[in-house]
Amino acid sequence: MSLYGKILLALDLSAECDQLINKAREIASANSAELYLLHVIEPLSFAYGGDVPMDLTTIQEQLDEHAHSRLNKYAEKIGYPVKEQMVITGHTETEIHRLAKEKAIDLIVVGSHGRHGLALLLGSTANSVLHGATCDVLAVRVHEEK
């Protein structure tokens, strides 16, 4: 019996994602696990508090299309069968937790930038995912690409 049957890899689509996909591939291979890829887009209305005097629908659709394209490239690059790729609009931590429960995920893999100072006090996505998850969470320390 494998330790992790279903793995959710949450990607922010940054340059550092290669570090995450390598780690997720290793763990998925070792466990013969199903691998799910996820990217969450925070709605533009979140960033502007909902008080935007223009329709953001077209811009949001362009962001979605771009995210689907980038996520597909990571799915091809990972070199392991991907059960499902998902781009979801919502609050990042909430959507990761919801999807992990919905898909009965055993392990969530996220990147951690090792923030310091004020960013550390305010928390990070990895920290929020860790504290609200009902399964194991692997926060992979990523290093900025130079």
Image (tube, rainbow, N blue to C red):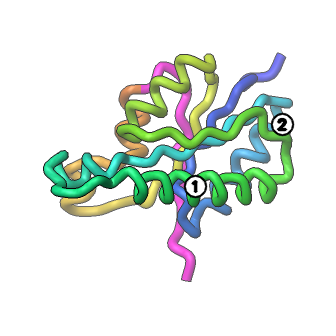
**Image quarter of the C terminus:** bottom right
Q: Secondary structure at mark 2?
A: helix
* Callout 2 amino acid: Ala
Q: In the visual, does 50 lie left or right of 10? A: left
Per the model, the C-alpha gap separating discs 1 and 2 is 32 Å
The residue sitting at 64% across, 59% down in the picture is 70
Marked residue nearer the N-terminal end (1 or 2): 2
| Residue that mark 1 sits on | 65
Q: Is residue 63 magenta?
A: no
Nearest-to-viewer mark from 1 and 2: 1
Q: Is residue 144 magenta?
A: yes
Q: Residues within 10 Å of mark 2 (few under 14, many from 20)?
A: few
Residue 126 percent across, percent down from the top left:
42, 44
| Residue that mark 2 sits on | 30
Q: Quadrant of residue 83?
A: top right
Q: Which mark is residue 92?
A: none
Residue interval drawn in magenta: 133-146
Q: Quadrant of residue 80?
A: top right
- Towards the viewer: 61 or 124: 61
* Callout 1 amino acid: Glu
Residue 13 percent across, percent down from the top left:
56, 59
